[in-house]
Amino acid sequence: MKILITDGISETGAKMLQDAGHEVVQQKLTPEELLQQIGEYEAILVRSATKVRQDAIDAGSKLKVIGRGGVGLDNIDVAYAKEKGIAVVNTPGASSISVAELAIAHMFAVSRFLPASNIEMRKGEWPKKAYSKGMELTGKTLGLFGFGNIGRETAKRALGLGMTVVAHDPFVTETDMDVTLVSKDDVLAKADYISLHIPFIKEQGATITAAEFAKMKDGVVLVNCARGGTVAEKDLLDALNSGKVRAAGIDVYENEPVTEAQTALVNHPNVSVTPHIGASTVEGQTRVGIEIAERVIDALKS
């Protein structure tokens, strides 16, 4: 069968698909090109860039499987695909370690002024005194929103650093880890650092808005390596400017790539930014490629 891969896959994953007897075509397509070509394929594999909406699903007359290399499925009309008898598969655990490590990296970065120090030293400055009041993560409380695969991996690393971890997840009622499951308001009130590991649900809007910032500790650190839109960016900028939020680490944005309207947030001196690279490690991409290949092969067999 013919499989279209639009957002890339590891060489290992591609070889697995070919070894299973499938024809693999890897090609970046515009939305218009996707509509023109998807009808030739029995399966399509995407990451976050390609959107598989109703029009693409209707155009994919031969489609049997839609695969998403990653956790979220917000770029795929899952319910509509299933109505059409098309299987939708993803890789919920493959990139968890990569994302968790980036979340922790952002915590370290803003706690020790790494982004600003890098910029100033490359200009020939020596900002030793200005950045002499860093913070240790050890002994602090990390609050997690979302306690699935990525949240758990983040918690493991935080516990190893000597942090206290509390978490809120409406779908998790017990855990075998040294993590206390609490209400949303308790996370907001208790946490020195807050890290998001939740989906963005368009109908519900942002999870963290001005109302949530008001309930946080003064000087809290916020990290978002989850989904753009889960934090109201204007409200975050206001909280940074007022000092309510000491610093933020951001990997995902309301608009991607970021627009001129987001410049003030991206360039804020107390913000560490990365361009949506949470899952982008060699190890993580290899695991994603292997797992999505296995799932697509199995789905095509059935």
Image: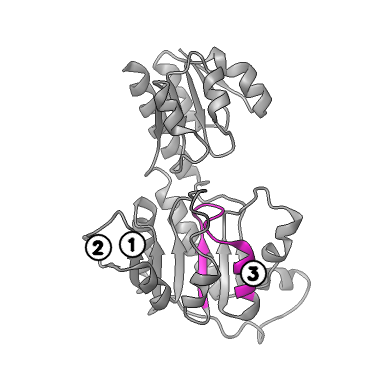
Residue 184's quadrant in the figure?
bottom left
Write down the residue under mark 1: 156
Identify the secondary structure beneath mark 1: helix
SS at mark 2 in the image: loop
How much space separates mark 1 and mark 2, taking CA atoms?
Answer: 8 Å
| Bounds of the magenta segment | 220-240
Residue at point 57%, 73% (across, down): 247
The numbered disc on residue 177 is 2
In the displayed structure, 300 sits above or below 180; it is: above
Q: Kindly check if marks 1 and 2 are in contact, taking CB atoms under 8 A apart as contact.
A: yes
Q: Which residue is mark 3?
A: 237
- Give left or right: position of 301 versus 235: left
Task: Name which quarter of the figure residue 229 lies in.
Answer: bottom right
What's the residue type where badge 3 is placed? Leu
User: Relative to 153, is 184 above or below?
Assistant: below
- Under tag 3, what secondary structure? helix
What distance separates the C-alpha of mark 3 from that of mark 2?
34 Å
Of badges 1 and 2, the one in the foreground is: 2
Mark toward the start of the polypeptide (3 vs 1):
1
